[in-house]
Amino acid sequence: MKIAFLGPKATFTDIAVREMFPSDEGIPYMTIPDCLDAVMKNEVDACVVPLENALEGSVNITLDYLIHEITLPILAEVTAPIRQHLMVHPQNKDNWKNIETIYSHSHAIAQCHKFLHQNCRGVQRVSVTSTAAAAKHVFDHPAEQAAAIANELAAEEYGLAVVAPDIHDFDFNHTRFIVLAKEASKFSNSPLQMVGNKTSLMITLPADDRSGALHQVLSAFAWRKLNLSKIESRPTKTGLGNYFFIIDVEMAMDQVLIPGAIAELEALGCSVNVLGSYPYYQVKQQKGVK
C-alpha cells in the first residue's frame, strides 16, 4: 500500500507513517493539500496528515481542506510524541550561537518560543513547509549561518548536528495524525496497540441562530451519556460570526446512541456530517538524541 505524508523524508508525519505502516511504502508530498489530493487522484491508497498539536492546537489547513475542498473519511488516528531539537550543519557546530536564521515549520517555531526567546533573540525565524524541509535546507546551504528545528530522524537523514536537544516549551508535546482513504478496506490493522475508538462529527447550527442552540446540541450528547473529548468551532467562510463545530465522541458508531443524537440534532435544524468512526493508536516516546 502507498501512503502519502507531509515530506520530505524525516518529518514527524513520516515517523507516524513508519510506526503505523511499517510494511508499506511512504511517499512524501510537499504540502498537506498535496497529500489529500494524491488520495483523490488515486496516486496513493491513503494519506497521513497532522490534525492537532497539544501545544499549538489544530492544524487549520488540514481541517479546512478536509471540510471545504474534498470528501475523505477518517479511518484511523495515531498520537505521537514530538521532540524538537535545534540542529546545524556539522561545520557550524562550534559556533552555533552565532546563527543568523532559524528555519522550521510555523508550529515547531511556536512550540519552542521559550528557548528561542531566551537564547536566540534577534535571530530571524523563517517558516517553511515542514521541519524536515528546514533540516534539508540547512544541510544544502552550509555557508549560511543557519539552524533548523526538527526531530532526531531529520538530523540523521540530512547529516546535521544537534546542538540543543528538547527545546520545546513543555514536556507533554504530542501531535494527533489522521489516516484518510477513499475506502475503509485500504486501511490494514496497525501493529500499534489500539487505545480506543472515536467518532468525529461536523455540526452546523440552525440558520435562525436562535438562543441556546449550542446548549441543545450538547444536551443531545449529555443525556445519552456520550463522552465528548473535543469540541471546536471553525468559520464556515460564509460571513463573520458563522461557524460550524467539530465534535469527537469517545466511542465507535453504534446502532442506537450516536444515530439517535444525530437524529435529534437534525430535528433541531442542525446539519450533521460524519467525518469518520475509527480506532486511535499511540506511538511510544521517541528515542533520545545520540
Image: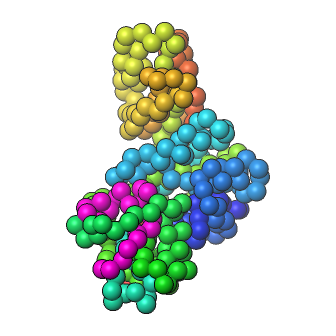
Tally of numbered tags: 0
Q: Is residue 250 above or below residue 22?
A: above
Q: Nearer the viewer, residue 75 or 100?
A: 100
For the point 59% across and 47% down, the residue is: 75
Range of residues picked out in magenta: 97-117
Q: Is residue 145 above or below residue 208?
A: below
Seen as rendered, the residue at the extreme left is: 118
- Which corner quadrant holds the N terminus? bottom right
Percent from the top left, x then y, of residue 193?
47, 59
For the point 33% across and 89% down, the residue is: 94
For the point 61% across and 35% down, the residue is: 68
Query: Residue 221 occupies which quadrant of the picture?
Result: top left
Seen as rendered, the residue at the extreme right is: 42
Q: Nearer the viewer, residue 52 or 160?
A: 160
Percent from the top left, x then y, of residue 154?
49, 75
For the point 54% across and 50% down, the residue is: 178
Specify whether residue 261 is in view: no
Q: Nearer the viewer, residue 232 or 95?
A: 95
Specify whether residue 109 is in view: yes
Percent from the top left, x then y, of residue 173?
34, 59
Q: Is residue 156 left or right of residue 189?
A: left
Percent from the top left, x then y, of residue 290?
38, 84
